[in-house]
Image (cartoon, grey):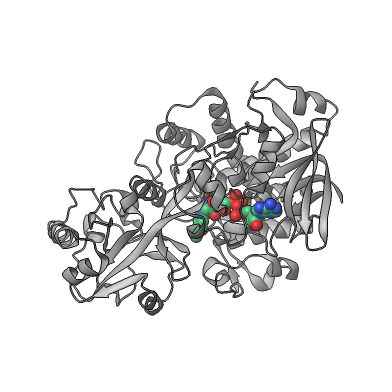
Amino acid sequence: MTFDVVVVGSGGGALVGAHLAQRAGLRTVVVERTAYVGGTSAYSGGACWLPGTPVQQEAGLPDSTDSARVYLDHVLGELDAPRRRRVEAFLAEAPRLVEALTADGTFAFEWTPFPEYYDAPGRVPGGRSIQPSAVRRADLPAAVAALVRPPVERDRMGREGRSTLSGGQALIARALTGFLHAGGTVRTEHRMTDLVVEDGRVVGVLAETPSGTVELRAERGVLLAAGGFEGNAELRTSRGVPGDAAWTMAPAGTNAGEPIEAGVRAGAATDLLDQGWLCPGMLHPDGRGSFVLAFRSGLMVDRAGRRYANENLPYDRFGREMAKAAERVPSWFVFDAGEGGRIPAIAMPEGDPAEHLAAGTWLRADSIAELAEATGAAGLEETVQRFNAYAQAGRDPDFGRGEDEYDTFFAGGGGPDAVVKPLAQGPFYAARFVLCDLGTKGGLVTDERARVLRADGSAIPGLYASSNSAASVMGETYPGPGAPLGTAMVFASLAVQDLLAAGQPDSAVSAETVAPNS
Ligand SMILES: Cc1cc2nc3c(=O)[nH]c(=O)nc-3n(C[C@H](O)[C@H](O)[C@H](O)COP(=O)(O)OP(=O)(O)OC[C@H]3O[C@@H](n4cnc5c(N)ncnc54)[C@H](O)[C@@H]3O)c2cc1C
């Protein structure tokens, strides 16, 4: 029960940190509350916003650490000195991390196009995020294959994963393989409930297990990387996070925020607690939400039947538009029969149209007038007439839909014509949409070494945080695909470097007594 490092959580940041720590010779245990590893990270597309690496160079992209800095400067706005240090640490570490992960073959990354979320200087056409290459289940150690959480559409139905693991599945499988190969320990069904603090230093965690509470000691330190508190209805409400615990994309029974609360009890400061990585979510018959992006046609209206934003905005930006007014949650996504009664978008998961119609999460009618009556969205007919006129003219003067590279990327590119299409072919459908999230993004305040800080800026000895357990370095913005995982992995790596330095002879100086934010 005594290790050098205890890592709480098993998402992308946690496992990358655990793998790097164990590989560097630190005895490391991963503590995971469920029977699976991977959390929301295993559901993800595995895109990692890690700029300036050899992977982008090999793909011939105009990406570099400098252009990423220019982009972030425009997207994040003015930064105070501690945040600037975190941004610089992130930019410097991203290429080093990718080299470290690929050096022994545990990881291979590739670039796949996926545009960034802001039209700002420094943006790379086609995007700069990279993804771990897929792995075949048959090539994985049996323990890894059994532990990786299945993709969302299968997990929600209690089914096993696929024969090829791609995206977030590949990220988790690769990191777990490396970690176990290096001799790491995984403890599933261990719900961390508190930190063990002795003489002001974090020396371990308490975890509830099926056979009672256990203490896991950490001789160097504890890394909290266990999601946010998206699954905790009470905390969400008290902190003012938009959306609802029932609608989050985090797997059921996972991220309730105990690690963040334990950090607070140990004296940590928090930030961004009212923030999430937001997205529009299609309501399912079981009351859960599903992440939807890349609308190929159709339009979104509020309860009164009025459009309120460009439906093809990057999902977090659309979610923020939704959060601006109560009458936007729920919204109705209205589409025609152009795709045979399926929603013209990527929905994860999509569900069965017949089940949606039977449950009333979707409504169907032969005319827009009837659909307006069924939904109660009085302005719908007028909105659709106006939208159809825009479709004919090939331009959306209200919201500029289709004008940005991101808007039409999933529809094959081109201009507004690719996504501003008339609703012409009945029957017509209205799908109920809620405000969904990929996780909360507020949490423990950390520095450029991922050390958890008190309100006075001093570091709590032995305590580190990354992933959605830490207040995001990206603040209230989502700059591009892979920002959650990229930052989670980088700050986990920086935590490991500090943990390694903590074992050096001058550790008392480097890890504990350095002046806050020096
Ligand atoms: C469909 C989808 C696609 C996405 N695509 C991308 C993408 O391509 N790129 C990207 O960057 N982001 C993507 N995201 C968002 C991203 O997946 C999450 O924001 C990120 O994975 C969160 O990482 P995390 O480690 O903080 O949490 P998680 O990955 O959810 O992991 C947290 C783990 O900690 C465990 N845990 C929680 N509390 C405790 C406790 N008390 N004790 C022990 N264990 C605990 C949980 O059970 C869970 O397994 C996507 C999300 C979804 C849903």
Ligand 1 - quadrant of the structure image: bottom right
Left or right placement of residue 96 versus residue 68 in this view: right
Q: Is 83 or 92 nearer to us in this picture?
A: 83
Left or right placement of residue 472 versus residue 512 in this view: left
What residue do we see at 43% from left, 68% from top? 284
Query: Does 487 appear above or below 36?
Result: above
Q: Residue 305's image quarter?
A: bottom left
Left or right placement of residue 113 versus residue 223 in this view: left
Measured as percent of width and height from the top left, residue 349 is found at: 46, 68
In which quadrant is the C terminus drawn?
Answer: top right
**Res 250 seen here:** yes
Query: Does 233 appear above or below 332?
Result: above
Query: Does 80 appear above or below 335?
Result: above
**Res 230 seen here:** no
Measured as percent of width and height from the top left, residue 394 is found at: 16, 56
What residue do we see at 35% from left, 76% from top? 357
Measured as percent of width and height from the top left, residue 406 is found at: 35, 51
